[in-house]
Image (cartoon, coloured by chain):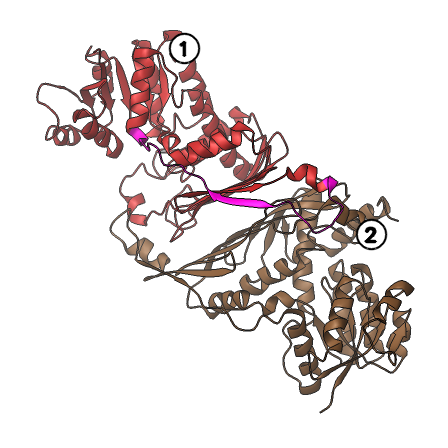
Chain colours: A red, B brown
Amino acid sequence: MKKLRIGIIGMGNMGSDHAKKLINGTITEVELTAVSDMDEMRLTASKTYLPETFGYFTSAEELIDSGLCDAVIIATPHYDHPRLAIQAFSRGLHVLCEKPAGVYTKQVREMNEKAQESGVVFCMMFNQRTNPMYRKMRELVQGGELGAIKRVNWIITDWYRTQAYYDSGSWRATWAGEGGGVLINQCPHNIDLLQWICGMPSKVRAFCHEGKWHDIEVEDDVTAYLEFPNGSTGVFVTTTADLPGTNRLEITLEMGKLVCEHGKLTLHKLSQNERDYCFKSKEGFTNPSVEVSVVPAEGDNSQHMGIIASFAKAILHGTPLIADGEEGIHSLMLSNAMHLSSWIGETVEFPIDEDLYLYELKKRISSSKRK
Amino acid sequence: MKKLRIGIIGMGNMGSDHAKKLINGTITEVELTAVSDMDEMRLTASKTYLPETFGYFTSAEELIDSGLCDAVIIATPHYDHPRLAIQAFSRGLHVLCEKPAGVYTKQVREMNEKAQESGVVFCMMFNQRTNPMYRKMRELVQGGELGAIKRVNWIITDWYRTQAYYDSGSWRATWAGEGGGVLINQCPHNIDLLQWICGMPSKVRAFCHEGKWHDIEVEDDVTAYLEFPNGSTGVFVTTTADLPGTNRLEITLEMGKLVCEHGKLTLHKLSQNERDYCFKSKEGFTNPSVEVSVVPAEGDNSQHMGIIASFAKAILHGTPLIADGEEGIHSLMLSNAMHLSSWIGETVEFPIDEDLYLYELKKRISSSKRK
């Protein structure tokens, strides 16, 4: 059997986690062959669980040029994702990129162009898409049997972080080091799932509070109001300071309501389409009958390994990816839109003004604590 | 025992409901003595369950001047509340007014002034304040043992109404007839509870959608973002078109979280104040222990009769009201702020510009379907 030879760039929390799993042969079609990190200490640490006869590099460029890898996983801080991905593409390597793809959409658009030019596979690590509950929600919403969406409400406030977390790296929670706070670090998964399940909004008005709960310069508290092309509305609330946090995603549709909370997906299904019922009923206070059920959504919750396996399959067998590089643009544009709306104090329409976003971001970078 | 002689002005749904309960002696200290309605049919209908020797009037003025009543309950359409209340005050009658007190705050301020001048009792029918769960929430939040509020989220979308409901009266859901939609007709209770439990916000940015789900000219879909004086934020979502609707009130505080849903109040209580913990913890991803419990909140849920009884007690014995006339201003200002913010497309600060609100409302009244 042909195996995909993979290298990991960046051996921080995520990179080393992937390495430990891959070296155990978790994915039969993948062979981990090399790792790189600018930090010698991290490389040394990785030698305790990785084979001696292996590619160890202190620069991503050396790993890319080593001839040891057909593909790379990029797990460095966000700002380096685009540059490294483009470098890998130019050498004909396939790329699986940790979220977010970049800090602003212009970069990610360029990444996609370069991947296409090189004819390689560009995949995004949106591992939450492997969660059977979210897969089921998407299937039910996109399948159409519940009719059009009317309202979405996601309270996703279970991203608690202490001040010690933010103090653990000088790049953390700075405009120059990360390009944002909870939206760019913790929430890319949720924002991706939101657009994956419900589609992209057409407008957003967000209220981001910077350094509200922690001694940081970026946002740690966000409330965003969304409008979708079909007129439905939504609310997205997140923070890293609520305890205990909430993770409750509610989607109301013409045929009922889906609620995902406490690891359970509940469907409230109407016997009739509400939109028809509303205008046909002769009574003012009645409603069609409702059937409530817990939707079975067990299946495989393969997370990161599921994404890596599908990445390998796409390269080796041409099967579809769970999240391709284009998907990196959507969620990032939505997150950028929330930042921009809050910065200018106005509703922002999609596609957003990318130049204005970048101008506003650069202003913040120039006065960032970490320059 | 001295009894309070009460008359009811307006024998629609609410008025006739109160009459049926009061005539059965539900409240020992209250004697129902008279009713009035401009509609003869309604008066005739009321004679089937009210005594023959009783005051029946086709005008509120006659009832007020009849000498049969010490106090009146005003249960007419909203726009008439201020005029009738002021008339009753000027004749020395106490007033219990259905919600909302009026359609704009200027009116309600005048009502309060007139009540004070006459030295009579002015009470608001905020009967949801008798719900033990909301009483308990208020006690826990205002009591201070949970620390300061950090976030509020109320999804209150279980006000379903069909088009037939709106078609049942030509005044319904018109600017001229009601002065608003779901905010002024269905939600005054929720808006009152919100400010009663959490205090008044300092800012609001609302998104009201008019005639979105029904053939009406006023709003039937609202999302509002709130900011409170202490910096905490909130979201209030309501509509008359979601099926099945949701009624979920979540309040996050420094010491944990309260969630009121499915007729159950759950407290998630932290062993330490999160604000202290955040800065003292040496770890990035830890949190203090949490104790989850269902808060006993059974007690008496006396609703309208509870308010009427407390109204009588306040007059006869000088005890405090559950909701006095001043309380009619707060919730109405919050509801007016949501309308105004949406109309002008901007964040509105409290106290709101009442003249601007009235100017904008009058524009809508002048082009209302019902003039």
Count the marks: how many? Answer: 2
At a point 29% along the width and 47% down the height, the residue shown is B285
As displayed, is residue A109 above or below residue B297? Answer: above
Q: Nearer the viewer, residue B38 or A78?
A: B38
Q: Is residue A287 magenta?
A: yes
Magenta segment range?
Answer: A279-304
Residue A220 picture quarter: top left
Q: Amino acid at mark 1?
A: Gln
Q: Nearer the viewer, residue A209 or A251?
A: A251
Residue B251 position within the rendered picture, expressed as x and y whole percent measured from the top left: 48, 57
Dot 1 lies on which element? Answer: helix
**Mark nearer the viewer, 1 or 2:** 2
Residue B201 shown left or right of residue A294 in the figure: right
As displayed, is residue A363 above or below residue B172? Answer: above
| Chain under disc 2 | B
**Main SS of residues in magenta:** loop
Residue A50 visible in the displayed image = yes
Give me the C-alpha separation between circle 1 and circle 2: 62 Å
Q: Nearer the viewer, residue A310 or A108?
A: A310
| Chain under disc 1 | A
Residue with the mark numbered 2: B169
Residue A73 shown left or right of residue A107 in the figure: left
Residue B193 shown left or right of residue B8 in the figure: left
Q: Is there one chain holding both mark 1 and mark 2?
A: no
Quarter of the picture holding the N terminus of chain A: top left
Residue with the mark numbered 1: A116
Residue B117 picture quarter: bottom right
